[in-house]
Image (cartoon, rainbow, N blue to C red):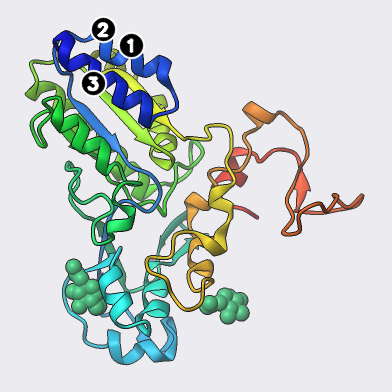
């Protein structure tokens, strides 16, 4: 990157991100444009769904959904289908049900509700981030993409996107983790592709929020030699790497439209593996006791069970018991 291009990129990223030290070295050390791969925040990736013969609208979804979902063929946009939910609020509980995850104790892993298949839309590109919702476009790196393009980045050439199914999370080592493992394989291939397409220069991962937690897991699980060869920098913005509370606000987590009942997605977001991945890490908080309450100002009970205890173990961060 020449000096002129470097400056706006530096300014822009510092303004957008909260980690200027990393970002400064990112822009200033490079004399050419290293490929950039963006991982957006929670809810920014788009998901398609398809119903299989196993799907039973009568038992799986609220009865009002039966008619809507019966005979639905092929892939359709499940998240974020703001248009459909605004046009027909009766779809809200149906989509909330289709988006729910179940924990399968036999497999030791999370999966969709029976009869629902899902896929992430547009892996490799940034265009889909926050689509179908103008209000969320900027929270989903929209302005960052524009600014990167203004300094010479081009989608598919040296600018790439790694959307992911934000319902899933990295599992502790040794635990089945099918969906997230697939994401890690695809991200490995994308980073290698980005580097090879750009004269073998290593790539820069720029992440926001939950994207940072996922990229962190990705890098930790990649061999050091591979990381040294393929990854130049890792920039995290707004990532509570030791813990965060926003994923615990189950009831208010990004409903896709203003639904009449703000809790209409609460049972759904509560079922996500990612809901627990932001519980306090013992690596950061040690064995300090944690206490959560809905009521501001309440003090922890002297005798208690699951609501207080040591910082969450890796198993608890994977699945609350
Ligand atoms: C959004 O949902 C509606 C209603 O289910 C569906 O008809 C439409 O195809 C979906 N949008 C996309 C982009 O798939
Ligand atoms: C969420 O689950 C609870 C317990 O099963 C149920 O009582 C409640 O009606 C559900 N809420 C919605 C919006 O589906």
Question: Mark 3 sits on what residue?
Answer: 8
- Mark in the foreground, 1 or 3: 3
Identity of the residue drawn at 43% across and 39% down: 209
Where ligand 1 lies, by quadrant?
bottom left
State the quadrant of the C terminus.
Answer: bottom right
The reply to whether residue 52 is visible in this rendering is: no
The percent coordinates of residue 271 (x first, y second) are 51, 62
The residue closer to the viewer here, 274 or 207, is 207
Quadrant housing residue 71: bottom left
The reply to whether residue 7 is visible in this rendering is: yes
Alpha carbons under labels 2 and 1: distance apart: 6 Å
The residue closer to the viewer here, 190 or 18, is 18
Q: Are marks 2 and 1 in contact (CB under 8 Å)?
A: yes
Q: Vertical placement of 190 versus 270: above or below?
A: above
Question: Mark 2 sits on what residue?
Answer: 29
The residue closer to the viewer here, 11 or 105, is 11
Q: How many marks?
A: 3
The percent coordinates of residue 74 (x first, y second) are 16, 73
- Circle 3 sits in a helix, a strand or a loop, which is it? helix
Question: Mark 1 sits on what residue?
Answer: 25
State the quadrant of the N terminus.
Answer: top left
State which tag comes first along the sequence, 1 or 3. Answer: 3
Assess disc 1: are there few (<14), some (14-19) or many (≥20) residues with their C-alpha within 10 Å of its C-alpha.
few
The percent coordinates of residue 179 (x first, y second) are 34, 50
Identity of the residue drawn at 38% across and 51% down: 166
């Amino acid at each position: 990157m020449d000096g002129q291009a470097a400056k706006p990129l530096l300014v822009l990223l510092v303004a957008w991100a909260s980690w200027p030290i990393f970002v400064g070295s990112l822009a200033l050390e490079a004399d050419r444009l290293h490929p950039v791969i963006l991982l957006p925040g929670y809810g920014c990736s788009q998901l398609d769904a398809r119903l299989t013969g196993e799907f039973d609208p009568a038992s799986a979804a609220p009865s009002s959904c039966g008619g809507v979902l019966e005979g639905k063929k092929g892939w359709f946009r499940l998240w974020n289908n703001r248009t459909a939910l605004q046009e027909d609020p009766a779809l809200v509980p149906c989509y909330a049900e289709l988006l729910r995850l179940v924990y399968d104790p036999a497999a030791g892993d999370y999966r969709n509700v029976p009869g629902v298949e899902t896929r992430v839309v547009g892996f490799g590109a940034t265009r889909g981030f926050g689509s179908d919702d103008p209000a969320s476009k900027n929270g989903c790196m929209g302005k960052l993409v524009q600014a990167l393009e203004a300094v010479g980045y081009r989608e598919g050439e040296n600018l790439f996107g790694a959307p992911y199914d934000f319902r899933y999370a990295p599992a502790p080592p040794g635990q089945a983790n099918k969906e997230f493992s697939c994401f890690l394989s695809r991200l490995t291939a994308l980073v290698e592709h980005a580097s090879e397409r750009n004269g073998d220069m290593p790539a820069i991962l720029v992440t926001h929020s939950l994207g940072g937690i996922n990229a962190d897991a990705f890098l930790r699980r990649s061999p050091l030699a591979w990381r040294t060869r393929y990854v130049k920098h890792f920039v995290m913005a707004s990532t509570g790497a030791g813990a965060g509370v926003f994923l615990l606000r189950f009831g208010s987590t990004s409903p896709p439209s203003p639904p009449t009942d703000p809790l209409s997605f609460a049972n759904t977001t509560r079922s996500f593996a990612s809901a627990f991945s932001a519980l306090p890490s013992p690596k950061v908080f040690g064995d300090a006791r944690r206490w959560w309450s809905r009521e501001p100002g309440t003090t922890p009970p002297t005798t208690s069970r699951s609501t207080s205890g040591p910082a969450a173990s890796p198993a608890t961060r994977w699945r609350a018991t």
